[in-house]
Image (spheres, rainbow, N blue to C red):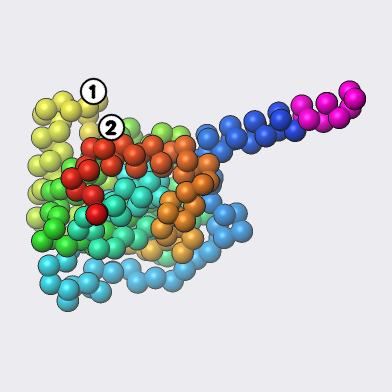
Amino acid sequence: MKKPMKKIQTYLKAATTIASAIFMMACGQASNPNKIIMNVETNTNPVNIHASNQGMDTATFGAGCFWCVEAVFQRLDGVVSIKSGYAGGMVKNPSYKEVCSGTTGHAEVCQIIFDKSKITFDELLEVFWKTHDPTTLNSQGNDHGTQYRSAVFYHNDEQKQLAEKYKQKINDEKAYPNPIVTEIVPYKNYYEAEEYHQNYYNQNGSQGYCQYVIQPKVEKFEKIFKDKMKK
């Protein structure tokens, strides 16, 4: 009976190790290894696609892993669509693997199309700054690297002014113990991420990263912004 018991103990030890690894993994480590080298050709200026839709506007935010950002913003009333992607880098049409290397200059972002009659850019900024830590440089939780930087990629002068004003207000009021490091920069070089990154939390909610990292963030968001949630 000793050998079977030893096998059971070995199995339980291995299972515990795997569970711990899942809990600690970063966004970049949780992807499908068979699809990580995909390099999808996409439209680099999706704003034009929606320009004819009166009342619609576009916001682009980087706040750590784009799976988390997407899961939060897609629940907001007034958000019409949202896509995970890469912005602000130097490399044309980068793959996820390249962006995760930190050598392309891109940040993981979510591009949000929103209905201005239901939600304003100011309200989006409020959600943005309250659902991640804007004081940690190139880092969110266990996700580290320039691709996880906090950033507002503004599409026009109005967005730039609103973002800078909001950032200054947060710093003046000392809402955080440390200064805001969020960069406010022009929107450029956006590329849509591979298909398996889209709608990630809704399609992979049982996975370890979703359970331990994204779900608590979504639950906190739903409590704070319950009046802004989609019905």
Helix, strand or loop at disc 1?
Answer: loop
Above or below 119: residue 177: above
- What residue sits 17% from the left and 62% below the top? 115
Which range is magenta?
Answer: 1-10
What's under tag 2, amino acid-wise?
A: Thr
Q: Which label sits on residue 135?
A: 2
Judging by the rendered image, the residue that carries numbered circle 1 is 177
- What residue sits 13% from the left and 58% below the top? 118
Residue 16 x/y as whole percent: 64, 30
What's under tag 1, amino acid-wise?
A: Pro
* Quarter assignment of residue 224: top left
Residue 107 x/y as whole percent: 36, 50
Q: Quadrant of the C terminus?
A: bottom left
Helix, strand or loop at disc 2?
Answer: loop
Image side of residue 71 versus residue 32, left or right:
left
Main structural element of the magenta stretch: helix, strand or loop? Answer: helix
Disc with the residue nearer the chain's start (1 vs 2): 2
Closer to the camera, 17 or 43? 17
- What residue sits 38% from the left and 63% below the top? 192
Residue 153 x/y as whole percent: 24, 53
**Distance of mark 1 from mark 2, alpha carbons?**
9 Å
- What residue sits 39% from the left and 70% below the top? 42
Q: Are marks 1 and 2 in contact (CB under 8 Å)?
A: yes
Image side of residue 222 versus residue 90, left or right:
left
Residue 80: say if magenta: no
Q: Residue furthest bottom?
A: 52
Examine the rendering and report whether any part of residue 213 can be seen.
yes
Residue 4: say if magenta: yes
